[in-house]
Structures are given as structure tokens and as C-alpha cells.
Amino acid sequence: MKIFLSVILAALMIGCANEFSDNADYLTEAPESYDDLMLQGWTAFENEDYDAAITAFSVAAERNATLPGVYLGLGWANIRALNLEEGRIYLGSASAFAFLDSVNSETITRDVKAGLAGIALAEHNYEDAVSYVDEVLAEDASYVFTYDSGVDADALKRIRMLSSFYLGEYTAAFNEVMDKGLSLPNVLHEMPAGGDVTAFAVADSGTTVGSEELKSAWLKVSAPGHSLSLGDYVVLTGLTDGGDASLTDLVGKITSGAGFAVQHVVDTDSFLLTSLSNAEKALVTSLSATGSEFHEGTGLVAETTDADLVGRIDVNIYAGRQLIAVNTVAQPGGSGSNYEITEINAGNTQFQVFGNPVFTAGHRVSVDYYYTDNFGEFLSNLVDMVNNI
């Protein structure tokens, strides 16, 4: 028996000697280091050889199982190999061990979240995808993944764009398109405008505007360069009482936030606002337009939806316009928006803002917004744009 075992051991040794006979330095070479294996892994990753990358990173993990970089490599390589669950697990380990690499911990954490955003999109977890993208870009608006420059801020925004669309958050998806400087057909931009009122008068009954003869006294405003169309709204500000105390109520009426609908556009320098009574007509000539302005209000405040939410206000745009996005809301002639846009009812005419001072119902406000007259066509164009950027 001892002789038989000796023969087997001798044979195995000879076999081993023959196997490695062409590499006499094998037993004297140092094993590959962690750093060498990590370099091999990322080189394979960049060359799209993800199986080789996984192998290299796995061996590197045997050298040092506590450094986060190896798990980052395993996570991303598995994502690219479409092993999403393994990718998620390894990225979780990279996140857990990130603090052990004090120099690169923040970068590793962002790279982990970028990878998780891609996994979430692939698995249709759109809310998670948006959340991960938001976190990465909040920390680094110019984010670029070290080992693949194609994974950058623009790529993450595309993930957010796609996710927003499939969540039905069409305004957010549209804003991503606009952020890229792109445009969609059949999308119109309405911006509030204004200018100085140089003069105004009351047009007498019998005055002809186009083919229509006016039947009553109308307030005619001279406003060079206005961009109003028939049916738009205007708010006059800065008008002063010419000295007759009885004009106070009239001045208050035509300078209030409620404003007037433009009944007729006479030409590029004047428009007609509303009819006046004979008594008002007689008083209007005492009003002074010095230093006054017109502001083209584009939103009408509706009733506050909840009395307990002080400052939360519903605003409507013109009927027939289907809302896409709202940029700003302000008092007519205001220097800017003091109001947070909290909800947009895309495809309809209403949105909600929060801020102070609280507008009263019927108040006219200046709104910068995008709209369409065919929301179905807009969605079709949007999804084509989102999928082909």
C-alpha cells in the first residue's frame, strides 16, 4: 500500500512539473497586487469586456475585501453585463465601505447613486431613478463618471427625463428638453410684457373699429409696441386722479389687479379696454397718464382651494390654452416672482402657487408659461424627443 501511494504522489508531482515546465519563474513571481487587479478590471470595463472586468475585480476583492473601489467596479461591471441584482448588491457594499476611502468617498458615493439610477430606470422604478439623479446632480451639477465619460450629467438628466415622462410628470420631462436647448412643435411661449401709457381717451359711440361700429363709450389706451391680441388682459398702473375727488372710484377700478379684457386691438399702438357709462366718460378726461404703465396680465386668480392653506392660490390661464409648464408668476409690473409654483395641471388651464401677499379671486397676475392647443400631439412629440435624445 505504501508503495502504491508513493507512485501516485510521484506521478502527481511529475504532472505538476510538466504543467509548469515552460514557466520556470512561476514559483518565484510575486502574486498580482490589488492595484494591478483593479487596473485590469477598469481597463476591461472601458474595453467593454465586462466578464473579464468581473473576474479581475473578484480576485482584487480576495486581496482586500474592505476597500469600496472593488465593489464599485463589481457593481458597474455587473450592471453592464445586465446582472442588475448583483450590481445593486455590490453597489450597496461600495456605499457601505465608502467611508474607508476618505479621499474618494464622496466621488464613490455619487458613482454608486448614478449606477443605482440606471438600475431603477431599467426596472421601471421611476421615482427612485429621479431621486438618485437629483441627489447626484445636487452634489455635482457637472458630474462625470471617472471610468466612462458617457455617464455624465446629461446622461443622468436623460434618465430623469424618461422617468418623469413615464411617471406622467410631463412638465418635468418638458423642462428637461428645454434645459437641453431643444424645442417641440406646436408649443407656444407666453410672456408678460408692458410699457408706458402715453395717452388715453374715450372713443365716442359711432367710432368704427375695423368693420364694427362701437355702440357705447370705450376706454382707449395709447400703448406703443403692445403685443396684445383680442381677448388678452391688461392692467393699468400709475394713473393719477386729475383733481376731481369723484374720480377716485374710477381710478381704483382701472388700476386694480383685476384689469380688463382687451375688447378690440385698434393697431400696434392702441387698444380698447371696456365700455364706460356717460358719467364715467365725462370724468375720464381728468385722469393723468403721466408715468403710468400697462402690463399684460396673463393669469386670472381663482378661489383659494383650502382656507387652511393661507397663501396657496389657484391661477387660470386663458381658456383654450392647454398648459405645459410655468416659469414665473408675479404681480403685474413686479420685478420678479415672489411665488413658488407648487402644482401644474398639465393639459388643462390651471396651476397652483404659494406665496404672499395672497392674491384675491379675480386678480390679474403676470405669468410666463408654455402651452399648446393640442396636448395629445404634444405628448406624442415629447415621447419621440425623449426616446431619441
Image (cartoon, rainbow, N blue to C red):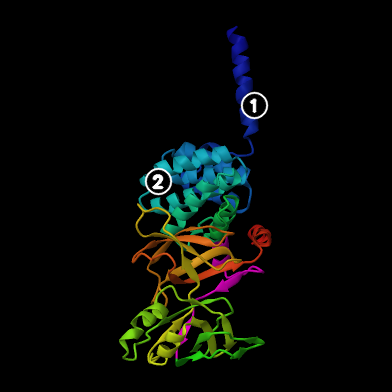
Q: Which residue is mark 2?
A: 98
Specify few, some or many for label 2: CA neighbours under 10 Å numbering under 14, 14-19, or 20 or more.
Answer: many
Q: Nearer the viewer, residue 166 or 68?
A: 166
Instruction: Look at the image and say whether residue 190 sits in the magenta stretch.
Output: yes
Q: State which mark lies toward you, 2 or 1.
A: 2
Q: CB of mark 2 within 8 Å of CB of mark 1?
A: no
Question: What's the amino acid at mark 1?
Answer: Gly
Q: Which residue is mark 1?
A: 15
Secondary structure under badge 2?
A: helix
**How many callouts does the rendering have?**
2
Question: What's the amino acid at mark 2?
Answer: Ala
Q: CA distance from mark 2 to mark 1?
A: 45 Å
Secondary structure under badge 1?
A: helix
The residue range painted magenta reads 174-197
Residue 355 in picture, x, y percent from top left: 36, 63
Name which of mark 2 and mark 1 comes first in the sequence. 1
Residue at image location 34% in from the left, 88% down from the top = 241
